């Protein structure tokens, strides 16, 4: 019974590494976090590597999206694309100037680069086999995990799981091909992280069982 409790504790401790929220800023920076509140103009969060630390805030106008640990996401491109009126005072006259909207419908110079960048920003790895690979490695063995990894990694992400941000862009053959290829690369990386973490967990369990049995 004691050994089972130790195993369950290790499994539960290993789960959070795959359960953080990811905040993506407009400059492409990712922040691993625990989102506390999404307000009208800003969000509040704690950094994942210091959950006992201070609460940070970011303006929504500086964010591209939030990918939550349950697989859902909030995107802010539409909110940030609304023209924001500015007022310029020249003498006694006020002139209202509107900022140009941000939109993915603007001309694209390189559809392949655009597809790769969008895949890294929007593809979340949903239903990519991370959970199955992790479970197979820990419960069975790293060899079983490798088999699961090989099967999952050899298959490109399904179209319904790509989460591409713009239908018109996705109709472009070059954009679609590069987006799908890069999403496949991201998928393999996520699977690699899963099997690596699971293998370490499995090794820890073996060491604990051997030491307790001796």
Image (cartoon, helix red, strand yellow):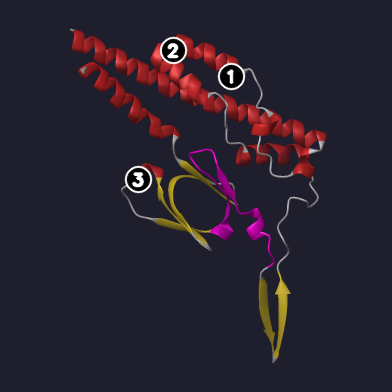
Residue at image coords 37%, 20%: 200
CB atoms of marks 2 and 3 within 8 Å: no
Callout 2 environment at 10 Å: few (<14), some (14 to 19), or many (20+)? many
Q: Magenta segment, which residues? A: 60-83
- Residue 25 to residue 3: above or below: below
Q: Position of residue 187 (x, y in %)?
A: 59, 27
Judge whether residue 131 is colored magenta: no
Where does residue 40 sit, x and y in percent of width and height? 53, 63
Quarter location, residue 207: top left
**Secondary structure of the residue carrying numbered label 3:** helix
Residue 21 image offset from top left, x and y in percent: 47, 43
Q: Which residue is mark 1?
A: 152
**Residue 82 among magenta residues:** yes
> Which residue position is annotated with label 2?
142
- Determine the CA span between mark 3 and mark 1: 32 Å
Residue at (59% x, 19% y) in the render: 152
Q: Residue furthest bottom?
A: 92
Left or right: 110 as drawn, with respect to 49? right
Q: Which residue is mark 3?
A: 50
Q: Is residue 154 left or right of residue 134?
A: right
Name the secondary structure under disc 2.
Answer: helix
Q: With respect to residue 158, does 122 lie above or below?
A: below
Find the distance from the CA under tag 2 to the CA under tag 3: 30 Å
Name the front one of labels 3 and 1. 1
Q: Quadrant of the N terminus?
A: top left
Categorize mark 1 by other alpha carbons within 10 Å: few (<14), some (14-19), many (20+): many
Q: Quadrant of residue 113?
A: top right
Relative depth, front residue between 194 and 90: 194
Q: Which is nearer the eye, 113 or 98?
A: 98
**Of callouts 3 and 1, the N-terminal one:** 3
């Amino acid at each position: 019974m004691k050994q089972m409790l130790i195993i369950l504790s290790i499994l539960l401790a290993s789960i959070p590494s795959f359960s953080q929220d990811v905040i993506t800023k407009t400059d492409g920076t990712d922040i691993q976090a625990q989102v506390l509140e999404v307000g009208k103009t800003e969000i509040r969060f704690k950094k994942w590597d210091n959950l006992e630390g201070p609460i940070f805030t970011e303006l929504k106008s500086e964010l591209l999206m939030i990918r939550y640990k349950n697989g859902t996401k909030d995107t802010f491109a539409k909110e940030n694309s609304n023209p924001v009126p500015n007022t310029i005072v020249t003498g006694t006259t006020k002139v209202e100037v509107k900022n140009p909207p941000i939109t993915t419908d603007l001309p694209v110079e390189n559809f392949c680069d655009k597809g790769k960048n969008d895949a890294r920003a929007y593809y979340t790895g949903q239903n990519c086999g991370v959970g199955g690979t992790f479970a197979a490695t820990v419960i069975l063995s790293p060899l079983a995990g490798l088999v699961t990894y090989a099967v999952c990694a050899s298959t490109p992400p399904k179209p319904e799981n790509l989460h591409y941000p713009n239908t018109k862009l996705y109709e472009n053959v070059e954009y679609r091909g590069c987006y799908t290829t890069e999403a496949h690369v991201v998928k393999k990386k996520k699977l690699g992280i899963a099997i690596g973490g699971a293998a370490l967990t499995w090794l820890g369990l073996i060491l604990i069982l051997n030491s307790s049995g001796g």
